[in-house]
């Protein structure tokens, strides 16, 4: 009997040395199911107010996440108990698609989590939390900035409020006048809001004079105040960006018209001819 107890004790000590705190061994990592497409994954994390949570997601073709569920988490040794399942989005899965989630998981080793009936296995894919952005497109992030995400307050048996997500550029204090020369605040906003465009075109909005154009063909002079009003309204209503693009002017046009670039909003296409007509309008103002 003493020999058996010693073996059990040594086993417990060994497991404690290997795994340490079970929660610490699984949190803020990405666990992906050992199965074919679509990819199923879990991320475990702790909220700013100390609650343990898990997000389960199914990744789809063309979309970062086609289903997102949130759970409250309770730990019982190496067993992960998932409670209070709630749907985070409005996605509707095809009824023919069978999705199996387990309410209890078990930490098998430092790189594997399994369901208690052993039918599902999740491997540690990344030593960081990668949660697909299921809620908003405004920020342009497919993967949610995790440190900002953790700081959002949430209680047990609750989903995130859309208004609590504020990951993208902040349009506050932008567009307070129609001076074509952007303020530092406006330039910083535009560099973030159109970051993919400025990377492609190697452009920086700092200390730049901008023409704003609108209308389906881009033939109408817009205004800075109207542009930012549209940005704010679309963000508040749809958590998304407006249809906008950047046209960097060549040196001749910069010299002739006194502007560095054109920013369009709600313009389908701006042809070279329409661009020239638009620039001519700036001289008539």
Image (spheres, grey):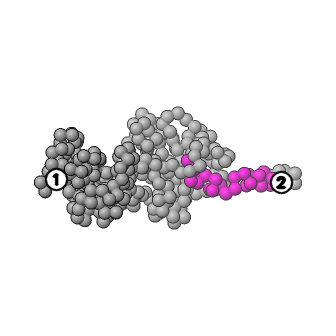
Furthest toward the right, the residue is 2
Q: Is 271 drawn above or below residue 18 in the view shown?
A: above
Q: Secondary structure at mark 1?
A: helix
Q: Is 214 drawn above or below residue 229 in the view shown?
A: above
Q: Secondary structure at mark 2?
A: helix
Residue at x-position 45% and y-position 62%: 152
Furthest toward the left, the residue is 284
Q: Is residue 187 left or right of residue 64?
A: left
Q: Is 33 drawn above or below residue 231 in the view shown?
A: above
10 Å crowding of disc 1: few (<14), some (14-19), many (20+): few
Mark 1 and mark 2: span between their CA atoms? 88 Å
Of marks 1 and 2, the one in the foreground = 1
Residue 26: say if magenta: yes
In the image, the segment drawn in magenta is 9-30
Q: Main secondary structure of the magenta part?
A: helix
Q: Is residue 116 visible?
A: no
């Amino acid at each position: 009997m003493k020999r058996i107890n010693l073996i059990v004790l040594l086993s417990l000590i060994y497991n404690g040395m290997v795994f340490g705190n079970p929660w610490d061994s699984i949190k803020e990592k990405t666990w992906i199911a050992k199965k074919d497409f679509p990819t199923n994954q879990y991320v475990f994390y702790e909220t700013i107010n100390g609650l343990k949570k898990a997000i389960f997601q199914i990744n789809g073709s063309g979309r970062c996440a086609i289903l997102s569920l949130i759970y409250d988490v309770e730990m019982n040794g190496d067993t992960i108990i998932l409670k209070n399942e709630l749907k985070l989005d409005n996605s509707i899965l095809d009824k023919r698609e069978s999705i199996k989630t387990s309410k209890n998981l078990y930490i098998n080793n430092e790189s594997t989590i399994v369901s208690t009936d052993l039918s599902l296995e999740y491997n540690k894919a990344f030593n960081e939390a990668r949660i697909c952005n299921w809620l908003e497109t405004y920020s342009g992030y497919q993967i949610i900035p995790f440190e900002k995400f953790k700081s959002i307050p949430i209680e047990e048996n609750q989903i995130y409020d859309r208004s609590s997500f504020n990951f993208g550029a902040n349009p506050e204090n932008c567009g307070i006048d129609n001076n074509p020369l952007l303020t530092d605040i406006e330039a910083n906003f535009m560099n973030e809001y159109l970051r993919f465009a400025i990377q492609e075109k190697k452009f920086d909005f700092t200390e730049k004079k901008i023409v704003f154009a609108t209308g389906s063909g881009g033939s109408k002079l817009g205004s800075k105040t109207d542009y930012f009003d549209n940005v704010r309204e679309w963000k508040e209503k749809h958590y998304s960006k407006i249809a906008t693009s950047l046209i960097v002017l060549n040196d001749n046009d910069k010299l002739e018209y006194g502007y560095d670039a054109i920013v369009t909003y709600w313009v389908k296409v701006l042809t070279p001819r329409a661009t020239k007509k638009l620039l001519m309008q700036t001289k008539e103002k």
